[in-house]
Amino acid sequence: MIEPIVPFGLGEIPPLSRSGVARDEQVRADPEHAARLWKSGRVILLDERLRTPVDQDPLRLVYRPCTDFGEEPVDGAVLLGMLLDENEQSFWALPHDAELSGEVFPPADSWGFATGARDAEGREWHDLRGVGSLLDDTEAGLLTTATALLNWHHRAGFCARDGSPVHMSQCGWATKCEQNGHEEYPRTDPAIICLVHDGAGGNGEQVLLARQPVWPPDRYSVLAGFVEAGESMEACVAREIMEEVGVPVRDIRYLGSQPWPFPRSLMIGFAAVADPSVPVRPAEGEIEQAKWVSKETVRAAIAAGGAIEGLKLPGETSIARQMLSGWAQA
């Protein structure tokens, strides 16, 4: 009896989809409860570029007691969540004007940007893109949420309806405008990301990868794009692949999702099948190069830590890496 082909899935849970704390909307709306949580809470600091201090070996977030900044929740503090234990340990984030200097490259297998810096004590500060995959489940979730919320507040200082200034409410999970009390909530933009393969043997033997002009040399990834108004996810997959590389796709199926708060995306992963004999036509100004890559080549890059000559895979923080790993293992 011939065993049926099992469709490939994600190699593991995307790093930024992990979490170890509970979110509770009722707590956010209860100032007295929030004030109690603050007194025993722990806070992470983020600078204007959303970098946070980390300890090394193992890499961990650096926490401060909330009461170092005041006996009650201070302006700008956002509640990230709580541990479900008898102590109801809470975690918060707070913008911080840090005195940082120099450049520190993020750990290996990130996206290759020199985003880090050092403070006066010599401690490294890194952003979510650089260290998200190296944190444990709880800390990855905390930094992802902190990045998403503070990114939103950096960009949402005025009411979208009447233009008046806004102030935080609900422990940072909403804003109210000063003029009419309109409430706004954090915005998330859905974006598809799709692994296109040739369908050979069911799970394919080649994958279609592309690179943007601004990426480091030899960096390739799967294709992605934003969902338009009034458009389904599946329709977006077909449209974006056609627009970016001129290739029609079929057999579109869902794989998984991951928040990508740069500044406010939710990456929704799909797989699709295309004919490798169809000429690839990269979109001018958006895609510098696109090519079919064999499964053996992708496996070799993964085994080498993410890069071989001519091919650097997406960093571990991205859902794209889990998609490629799952496909390569199938």
Image: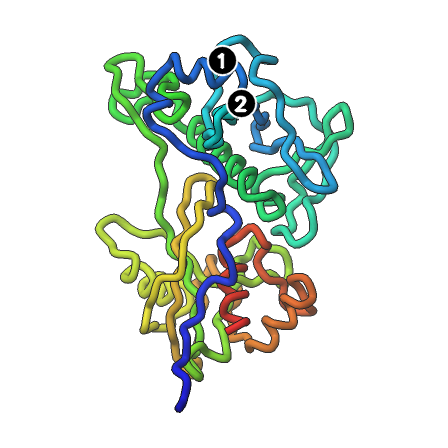
Say whether marks 2 and 1 touch (CB < 8 Å). yes
Q: Quadrant of residue 64?
A: top right
Q: Position of residue 227 (x, y in %)?
A: 32, 52
Front residue of this view, candidates 226 and 124: 124
Q: Quadrant of residue 307?
A: bottom right
Residue at the farthest front position: 86
Q: Position of residue 203 (x, y in %)?
A: 44, 77
| Crowd class of label 2 (few under 14; some 14 to 19; many from 20; radius 10 Å) | some
Residue that appears at 35% across and 67% down = 242
Front residue of this view, candidates 248 and 294: 294
Q: Can residue 215 be seen in this view?
A: yes
Task: Please say if 243 is above or below 71.
Answer: below
Badge 2 amino acid: Leu
**Does residue 307 appear left or right of residue 215 in this picture?**
right
Residue that appears at 49% across and 54% down = 13
Task: Please say if 61 is above or below 222.
Answer: above
Task: Please say if 254 is above or below 153.
Answer: below
Residue at the farthest left position: 230
| Crowd class of label 1 (few under 14; some 14 to 19; many from 20; radius 10 Å) | some
- Tell me how far mark 2 sits from mark 1, CA to CA: 9 Å
Residue that appears at 29% across and 51% down = 228
Q: What secondary structure is found at the residue carrying circle 1?
A: loop
Residue that appears at 46% across and 14% down = 36
Q: What secondary structure is found at the residue carrying circle 2?
A: strand
Q: Which residue does the numbered mark 2 point to in the structure image?
A: 94
**Does residue 329 appear left or right of residue 101 in this picture?**
left
Q: Where is residue 37 in the image (x, y as percent from the top left)?
A: 47, 18
Badge 1 amino acid: Val
Q: Is residue 150 visible?
A: no
Q: Which residue does the numbered mark 1 point to in the structure image?
A: 74
